[in-house]
Amino acid sequence: MSDVLLSVDHFTKRFGGVTAVNDCSFSVESGSITALIGPNGSGKTTLFNMITGYLKADSGSITFNGETITRPRPADLYRKGLSRTFQQARIFPELTVIENLVVAAGYSWKGLFGKRVSLDDEVRAQKMLHEFRLESLAQLPSGELSYGQRKLLEFAAVLMSEPSLVLLDEPTAGVNPVMIDTMERHIRERNAAGVTFLIVEHDMQLVMRLCNPVVVLDQGSPIAFGAPATIQTDPLVLEAYLGS
């Protein structure tokens, strides 16, 4: 049986009189590709932001790799092995594609332009470019990439820190079917190499063939957890989606 890598414990977040996340608890097992799904407005991205420290929780904590963290901070979690992507890819558009990867490995801008990048990290960046088929774009300013290429670059960049857990926020939103297949392939390959994933995704066909287990949120709280086949027939899940 797999070990729990991440536990979300009683997270709550309110915005004025609106409760966006309500006493939310669930876990992610090491080695899994876990999906976090739910109707629009169910609190998925808010929860992602709380887990990764971009938004302060009103109450609750996370436990990551055995360590309980009451106030998650993005930089601390990154160093501990938890990284994430965003709905809109966050890259440095004025840097080249390969420079984005080198910065993601932990170099400051000063270190980057001072040419003090280690040979190992440069080699890793080159390998990452090859894996994601971005070699021909290595010296291109990242701002010139297509939307899908930016998503691929951000995914490659978060992997430069060699994380144990990656949170992907709608990795296939707005991309074409070929790019969806490419994303799925990279997720599967990295998972086979030992990386655990927690994914927010609206493409249910992708979720059902890629993810297991699936966590379903509705109005900020988990209403179902289990295998895709079970989730598809759960009355509470059907009601949440059909009633949204």
Image (spheres, rainbow, N blue to C red):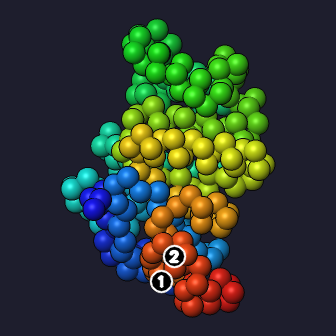
Q: Residue at x 55, y 86 (%)?
A: 234
x, y percent for residue 64: 28, 55
* First-in-chain label (2 vs 1): 2
Q: Is residue 90 visible?
A: no
Q: Amino acid at mark 2?
A: Val
Q: Residue at x 68, y 47 (%)?
A: 181
Left or right: where 146 falls relative to 234? right
Q: Amino acid at mark 1?
A: Ile
Residue that label 1 marks: 223
Q: Residue at x 60, y 44 (%)?
A: 185
Frontmost residue, 201 versus 227:
227
x, y percent for residue 176: 78, 49
Q: Which mark is residue 216?
A: 2
Q: Quadrant of the N terminus?
A: bottom left
Q: Is 121 above or below relative to 9? A: above
x, y percent for residue 123: 47, 15
Q: Residue at x 76, y 44 (%)?
A: 178
Query: SS at mark 2?
Result: strand
x, y percent for residue 111: 43, 16
